[in-house]
Every structure is written in structure tokens, then in C-alpha cells.
Amino acid sequence: MLVGKNGEYNFDCPIDKRLFEFAGISADALKQQLEAGKGDGEIVQWIQENGTKRTAAEIAAWSAQEEQRAPSDVETRAFFNDLHKQAGPERTDISSWFDLLDLDDYVTFGGKA
């Protein structure tokens, strides 16, 4: 995003928005931190200091729910299926958004579906 190497990834997409809401931060505030050159550990620390305070149990429950999230309507399912067909149509284990993202990243960087 900032250095032009994000490919098809769109910052502040629906998945990002769910994280921002849960973490209690805004896309613009996070982008400012990224523009300052902060690394992953520094970003996590910034979120912990500036976002909504969450317990380990809340984080684990939210993460588990997000890992299982799948398209919830016909139009989104069609979009999901189109991406799945492009990345690895023979893969029958792709059912959640994170499954699809993992597959797409793997194939994009040279792996075989």
C-alpha cells in the first residue's frame, strides 16, 4: 500500500474494518503509524496502547470467529467462488475468507494450489 507492492490488496477493506472496529482504532490512525515506518511489534504495541482494551479471552474468541467467517450472501459467495476458481479450483478445503486469503497468498508467491 505505502510502497506500491500490495498487489490486489485493498487497505480498509471489509476484513480490515472488522479488525479496526474490534481494536477500537481507525484506518487513518493506523495508516499514520505505518507511514512512520513502524514494524509489526511496534504496531501491536501502538494498538494495545491506543485501542480498546481487550482481554486475552476476548481476543481469542474474536479471532476464532474471524477465522471461520465465510461469505454471508449470494453476491459475496459468487465473488468468493470466482476468486477460489482462480487460485485453486481443485481445493475442496477452502470455506472461509482466511482459507481463501491463505491460498491466494500461497499461489501468488509461487506455490502450487
Image: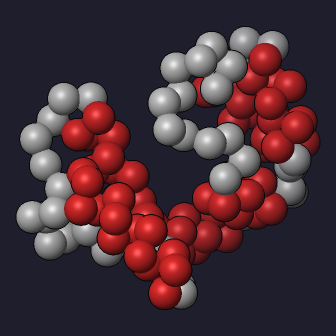
Report x, y in % for residue 21: 80, 62
Residue 2 to residue 48: above or below? above
Q: Residue at x 73, y 58 (%)?
A: 17
Locate the N terminus by quadrant.
Answer: top right
Q: Is residue 113 among what the camera can see?
A: yes
Report x, y in % for residue 97: 43, 65
Residue 95 to residue 14: above or below? below
Task: Kindly indicate the quadrant of the structure image that contains residue 45.
Answer: top right
Q: Residue at x 53, y 28 (%)?
A: 6
Report x, y in % for residue 44: 69, 36
Residue 63 falls left or right of residue 97? right
**Frontmost residue, 18 versus 76:** 76
Task: Kindly indicate the quadrant of the structure image that contains residue 49.
Answer: top right
The number of numbered discs placed on residues in the rendered structure image is 0
Residue 13 falls left or right of residue 70? right
Q: Is residue 49 among what the camera can see?
A: no
**Frontmost residue, 53 versus 23:** 23
Q: How is the image coloured?
A: secondary structure
Q: Residue at x 26, y 68 (%)?
A: 94
Report x, y in % for residue 31: 80, 30
Residue 7 to residue 107: above or below? above
Q: Residue at x 29, y 62 (%)?
A: 84
**Frontmost residue, 13 versus 40:** 13
Residue 74 to residue 88: above or below? below
